[in-house]
Image: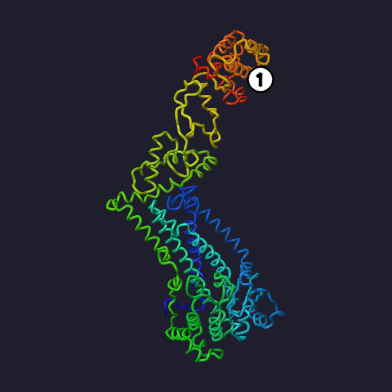
């Protein structure tokens, strides 16, 4: 007995149910492989530590479950709308006994014999000869036939076709093939949009980033292999279910010759215009060759019937005439196979590959040409180093790819969710240093450029997507307004502007942390001057809007005349007033005026205020009512009141 021969009706059912389940798992695996290719570039940008090819373990742990759940959700949605989508694609209409009395008369006894709930019946107004059953559950299944099938088949032939479709419903094939079609649609779309399929862009990228070449070749091959595995699986599943449905239709009608005759007629004109190729898998006849192959050949199907029913296929009253057998190559092949007690060779893989544009590597002719161009370009460019395997292997290192296009976005999310900043240290430790001196590659050029930028003090010397927002940032020592600040680095752009505290853009405003550092180290406070001239812009006795220096000094004295119960509000008001008056005294009246003001503040009347402020700074409740800068000002004032002056005055020698 041939390897592919069925072993009786129930043997077919038992063996192929298990085989179909295994092939269905293969579909899920193929979808995962195609999804990994589709996600490669996006994840390389946003999460290189968990991207395919860059971190397979991380990808499997983080994204494989997401792909599985997403595909299950998408699959469920597609299954829910399955009948409606098929109806729109092939354009059938529902009919009843009034519309199609002959059709309904033939199908009703078959439904009863099968023990099925009555399905809906539909007709496609097409002269093609074909039929299919679709749906998810038996109670909502639909049996659809074409007008050509109704007109061209005899009653016994049409009954065999209807029995075939009802067998699909009873066996649950309608669900299985709907699932196979949905998965194949997904595989086809993923393969067509595979970002690693060879294009001229990949050729250019491979010249400067050599690792692109093996990545693209591997990605194209994996994508092609996954698609081909899906096509072979679908053909095997569909073929198995067709053999079973043929045999059960014969068992139901007791007319194998009519079944064979119907198959021959359907084979001659089966294609329904406007139908999707994916819908062919549901029909009684479809492509048997090429990437859309979904059915066993008619010789295989008739030979399979002969294995189950014997010579009745050829000798029963409804059998085709001898002339039909002799004039048809496929029928002759089926009869010869039946006499030899084996099926014609299945040749599933070769049938699927027939006429395919891609070779076993997943490359079209143009893809082969472009791959050759990339190889020739790389060999030419690196010929002088080609004899050094270690040097050449370093050029194909995949890590620079994540450095060039990687982004710490996923790390930022991880920090926000978990608070664990360990990933920041891992990210910041990455550098181009080990690729310095590499010739004729983008990684080498970036590494050398990074070394030059590092020498110039840039905080983000590595040129990559992750550093685009800070490429011009330099880290330099900031001496402050006083000129006396030490060991303090400021982040600035090329024009000397400070990075904004919220990280968006640059500003001339000095960051708060630098102001606080100057208060802590020097004791003076940051002040924006209108004049700031050491000799003073106005004479000490000059009146401004009726107020002169003596008036400011009196205001300083008055600020200390507060009730014996020094409230937190009065302390904060005193701090603000002292800072403002000290700043004005220097801005308007210069170093001499500032000296007068500081002399006034050295009066013992201010001592209780300073002492009380020192006491209250030990209470967290007091500091909660102030921002960090004012807390630092209060601490500087308490620590050394004589140094609590505008920093520009310190620079001028105060």
Q: Where is residue 198 in the image (x, y as percent from the top left)?
A: 43, 60
Residue 11 visible in image = no
- Which residue does the image show at 51% across and 84% down from the upper left? 309
Q: In which quarter of the image is the N terminus?
A: bottom left
Q: Determine the residue located farthest toward the left in the rendered image.
A: 387
Q: Where is residue 494 in the image (x, y as percent from the top left)?
A: 47, 34
Residue closer to the observer: 35 or 143: 35
Q: Position of residue 43 (x, y in %)?
A: 49, 50
Query: Would you place residue 310 above or below residue 166 in this image?
Result: below
Circle 1 crowding by C-alpha within 10 Å: few under 14, some 14–19, many from 20 = few
Residue closer to the observer: 535 or 2: 535
Residue closer to the observer: 110 or 619: 619
Residue 110 visible in image = yes
Residue designated by label 1: 569
Q: Position of residue 286 (x, y in %)?
A: 53, 75
- Which residue does the image show at 45% across and 78% down from the upper left? 5
């Amino acid at each position: 007995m041939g390897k592919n021969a069925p072993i009786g009706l129930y043997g077919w059912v038992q063996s192929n149910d298990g085989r179909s389940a295994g092939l269905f798992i293969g579909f899920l695996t193929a979808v995962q492989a195609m999804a990994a290719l589709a996600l490669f570039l996006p994840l390389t940008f946003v999460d290189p530590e968990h991207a395919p090819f860059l971190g397979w373990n991380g990808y499997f742990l983080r994204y494989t479950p997401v792909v599985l759940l997403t595909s299950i959700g998408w699959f469920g949605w597609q299954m829910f709308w399955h009948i409606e989508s098929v109806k729109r694609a092939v354009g059938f209409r529902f009919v009843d006994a009034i519309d199609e009395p002959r059709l309904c008369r033939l199908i009703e006894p078959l439904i009863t014999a099968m023990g099925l709930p009555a399905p809906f019946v539909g007709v496609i107004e097409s002269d093609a000869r074909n039929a299919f059953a679709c749906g998810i559950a038996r109670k909502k299944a639909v049996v659809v036939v074409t007008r050509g099938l109704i007109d061209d088949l005899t009653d016994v032939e049409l009954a065999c076709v209807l029995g075939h479709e009802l067998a699909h419903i009873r066996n649950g094939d309608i669900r299985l093939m709907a699932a196979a079609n949905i998965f194949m649609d997904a595989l086809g779309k993923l393969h067509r949009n595979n970002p690693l399929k060879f294009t001229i862009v990949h050729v250019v990228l491979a010249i400067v980033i050599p690792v692109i070449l093996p990545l693209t070749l591997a990605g194209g091959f994996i994508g092609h292999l996954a698609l081909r595995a899906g096509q072979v699986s679908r053909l095997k599943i569909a073929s198995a279910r067709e053999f079973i449905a043929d045999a059960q239709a014969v068992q139901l009608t007791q007319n194998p010759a009519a079944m064979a005759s119907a198959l021959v007629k359907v084979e001659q004109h089966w294609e329904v215009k406007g139908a999707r190729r994916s819908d062919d898998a549901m029909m009684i006849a479809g492509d048997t060759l090429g990437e859309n192959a979904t059915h066993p050949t008619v010789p295989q199907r008739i030979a399979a019937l002969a294995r189950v029913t014997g010579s009745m296929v050829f000798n029963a009253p409804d059998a085709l005439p001898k002339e039909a057998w002799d004039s048809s190559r496929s029928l002759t092949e089926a009869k010869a196979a039946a006499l030899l007690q084996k099926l014609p060779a299945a040749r599933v893989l070769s049938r699927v590959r027939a006429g395919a544009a891609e070779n076993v590597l997943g490359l079209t002719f143009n893809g082969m040409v472009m791959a050759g161009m990339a190889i020739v370009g790389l060999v030419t460019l690196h010929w002088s180093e080609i004899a050094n395997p270690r040097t050449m292997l370093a050029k194909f290192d995949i890590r620079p790819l994540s450095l060039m296009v990687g982004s710490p976005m996923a790390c930022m999310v991880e920090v926000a969710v978990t608070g664990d900043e360990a990933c920041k240290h891992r990210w910041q430790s990455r550098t181009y240093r080990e690729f310095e001196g590499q010739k004729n590659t983008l990684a080498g050029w970036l590494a050398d450029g990074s070394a030059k930028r590092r020498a110039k003090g840039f905080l983000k010397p590595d040129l990559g997507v992750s550093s685009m927002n800070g490429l011009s940032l330099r880290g330099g020592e900031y001496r402050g307004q006083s000129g006396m600040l030490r060991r303090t680095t400021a982040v600035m752009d090329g024009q000397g502007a400070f990075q904004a505290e919220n990280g968006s853009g640059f500003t001339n405003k000095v960051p708060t942390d630098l102001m606080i550092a100057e208060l802590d180290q020097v004791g003076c406070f940051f002040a924006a001057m209108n004049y700031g001239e050491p000799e003073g812009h106005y004479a000490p006795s000059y009146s401004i809007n009726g107020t002169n220096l003596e008036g400011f000094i009196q205001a300083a004295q008055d600020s200390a005349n507060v009730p014996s119960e020094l409230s937190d509000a009065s302390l904060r008001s005193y701090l603000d007033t002292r800072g403002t008056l000290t700043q004005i005294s220097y801005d308007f009246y210069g170093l001499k005026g500032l000296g007068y003001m500081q002399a006034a503040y050295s009066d013992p009347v201010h001592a209780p205020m300073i002492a009380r402020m020192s006491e209250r700074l030990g209470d967290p409740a007091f500091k909660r009512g102030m921002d960090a800068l004012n807390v630092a000002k209060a601490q500087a004032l308490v620590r050394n009141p004589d140094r609590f002056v505008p920093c520009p005055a310190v620079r001028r020698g105060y």
